[in-house]
Image: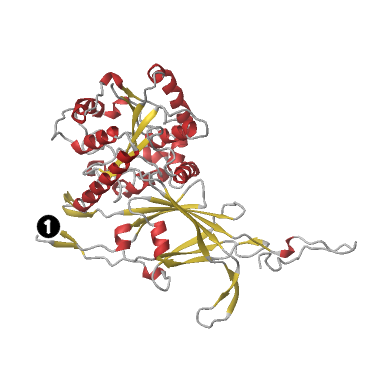
Amino acid sequence: MDTIVVFVHGWSVTHTDTYGELPARLANDARREGLSIRTAEIHLGRYISFHDEVKVKDIARAFENAVKQQLGSLLSSGRRFVCITHSTGGPVVREWWRRYYQKSGAETCPMSHLIMLAPANYGSALALLGKGKISRMKSWFGGVEPGQGVLDWLALGSREAWNLNYEWIQSKAKYIGPKGVFPFVLTGQQIDRKLYDNLNAYTGELGSDGVVRAAAANLRGSYVRLAQQDLVAEVNARSGKKTGELQARLAIEQEITAAETPFCIVPKRSHSGKNMGIMRSVKKGGGAHGRNQNTVDAILKCIAVDSVQGHQALAKDFHQTTKKVQDDEVLEVVDGMLWRSTDFIHDCYSMAIFRVTDQEGYPVTDFDLILTAGDTSSPNHLPKGFFMDRQRNPNNGNTVTYYFNHSAMTSCPAVLDKNDDNRVVRPAIEGTRTLGFQIKPRPTEGFAHYVKGEIKASTQVFDAVLKPNATTMVDIVLRRVVGEETCRLDKGIKSNSFKKTKPGKPLDL
């Protein structure tokens, strides 16, 4: 029986030619894997994302209608389809899957496999730039109007992306399997220098494909909840005396990682473009040594999976492939940039999204978050080159995303140019296996305020938060301190002014 394949494009696409020759190539090469994909069974999806009023949830609703209307006759016989997405198409289909088929009593999802190419599962650093700048970038959008509704979802740390990924992480492997869906992620980590935007360094960001970070594409994210414990009086480290200020240590209350999902970094692939794009660069001509065979082979391996055991086996296979690719691509030497050769070191990266609230659920938007390491939990003990980027979400001021060089954090050997007499491009970096956090929220006084908190640097915190090629969502929950004089019941009937009342002792003590 022929396999039904549905393609779903990315954001701000205006023509189905965005899929290039990949659909035809898959149909040609499928026979080698014992699969049958006829072009008549390939459906090229199109959706509107370049209007400001359209949101990801709107597209998910429309996708459900399109599936029912245009595939209904095929699906009514019990057949299911394989979905191949690019870029924002991944989150769109995931939202559709969650909305209609990940709820109690839902019917079997008509999609059997979800193969995401360069998906922005945790967003894109580029989304923060705004519509005007993004619409001019040839690396991603082709100069059409960016839709603000979808752009808001893509901004790192958006509430919508947080909720979708939080539910996925908590569900573990509940929705994966023959009666559920088999998900996969394929992405690149190379930059097509012809599409590089000199005015925006994000289009050449290491650890990304020029648009989406590998860590943001990987579906196997983690969730950590750090919560402040009981309030205590701060003690001066030198004198041992109480300072009069209060603090509350942070402790890990929950730590969970999503189910294993096959994740593969495909060699020499970028986000878009006809030369290196993970989708557009694939050509019709196939065969065992055809161009972009790695991409096509990986997709066909995904389609061939029909069991949980096969899904897990492919995850291990992809893990080995990814390790080899990252080892092979660690050094990129580009000739002719700035009148000389330029070295680019492709390390492994991690992303962490921090959301700060209090125990009442109020967002805390004014705070300093300080990273520490070493036996003394000091910021000075963090390794050189560990920190890459920081972004606060424009719509949720209590959410901030940090981007880490995981290789630098964990130590890495010297990078040598084997084609240039083993020239030392970068000496070895001595990393750390410990990580901690200090948070200084504001306001720090008044009838309702906050106190600083800290979790000491440790291997436990490091391993919980920093995952190679992956994203961790970290909830930091603060104690909201309320003074006892905020409300009083005075004895008697004599009236008094309470205009100059002081907050009094904290209720938590």
In the image: residue 345, left or right of residue 235: left
User: Nearest the camera: 54 or 348?
Assistant: 348
Q: Which residue is mark 1?
A: 418
Kindly indicate the quadrant of the structure image that contains residue 493.
Answer: bottom right
- Residue 129 location in percent, x, y? 40, 45
Residue extending furthest toward the bottom: 239
The image quadrant of residue 279 is top left
Task: Inspect this view and state whether residue 136 appears.
Answer: no
Does residue 293 appear to the left or right of 161 in the view shown? left
Q: Quadrant of the N terminus?
A: top left
Above or below, comparing residue 381 to residue 122 in the picture: below
Q: Residue at x 26, y 44 (%)?
A: 318
Residue type, label 1: Lys
Q: Percent position (x, y) of residue 74?
A: 37, 18
Q: Quadrant of the C terminus?
A: bottom right
Task: Using residue 290 as the reference point, say whether residue 436 is left or right of it.
Answer: right
Q: Tell me the residue at 25%/53% (across/down).
A: 346
